[in-house]
Image (tube, helix red, strand yellow):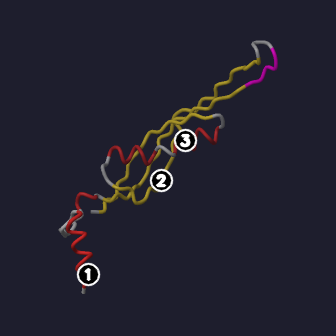
């Protein structure tokens, strides 16, 4: 039912600051693991981070093509993150079945019997 896995996940992130780009990349770890293993995530523990690529792109932005030039940066990172994840396989859980009579009529008659007693 509970399974512990260790795997390497490659994630990418882009942002206006270095911190935003790295944070965006690390936020994708859970989604990548859950897409691969159809289970519930209990815990993710990063064991190591390896930087594959880090790029800073700079361009000059101008107001109305001529005025107020300013430089803008965009940061891109690619990381390999080794994680240890604890997963819970929902399909292995045995649920007990309880069937109750349903429907509107059964609900109305059941409420009348309780109030009459």
Residue at (51% x, 46% y) in the render: 27
Q: Where is residue 48 in the image (x, y as percent from the top left)?
A: 49, 49
Q: Closer to the camera: disc 3 or disc 2?
A: 3
Q: Where is residue 40 in the image (x, y as percent from the top left)?
A: 35, 56
* Circle 1: element type: helix
* Circle 2: element type: strand
Question: Badge 3 local density, few (<14 within 10 Å), some, or many (20+)?
Answer: some
Question: Badge 2 local density, few (<14 within 10 Å), some, or many (20+)?
Answer: few
- 78 up-or-down from 87: above or below: above
Q: CA gap, disc 3 to disc 2?
A: 18 Å
Q: Which of 105 and 55 is in front in this view?
A: 105
Q: Position of residue 3 (x, y in %)?
A: 31, 59
Viewed as shown, does residue 45 lie left or right of 2? Answer: right
Residue bearing the label numbered 1: 114
Report the magenta stretch's main SS: strand
* Image quarter hosting the N terminus: bottom left
Write down the region rendered in magenta.
Answer: 67-71
Q: Closer to the camera: disc 1 or disc 3?
A: 1
**Residue at the extreme bottom:** 117
Labels 3 and 2: the sequence-earlier one: 3
**Residue at the extreme top:** 66
Q: Position of residue 46 (x, y in %)?
A: 48, 53
Labels 2 and 1: the sequence-earlier one: 2
Residue bearing the label numbered 3: 24
Viewed as shown, does residue 46 lie left or right of 106? Answer: right
Residue at (28% x, 58% y) in the render: 89
């Amino acid at each position: 039912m509970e399974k512990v896995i260790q795997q390497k996940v490659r994630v990418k992130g882009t942002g206006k600051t270095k911190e935003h780009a790295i944070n965006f990349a690390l936020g994708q770890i859970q989604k990548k693991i859950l897409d691969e293993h159809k289970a519930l995530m209990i815990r993710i523990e990063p064991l190591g981070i390896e930087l594959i690529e880090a790029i800073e792109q700079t361009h000059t932005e101008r107001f109305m093509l001529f005025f107020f030039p300013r430089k803008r940066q965009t940061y891109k990172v690619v990381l390999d993150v080794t994680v240890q994840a604890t997963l819970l396989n929902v399909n292995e859980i045995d649920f007990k079945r309880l069937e109750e009579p349903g429907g509107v009529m059964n609900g109305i008659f059941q409420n009348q019997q309780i109030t009459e007693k």
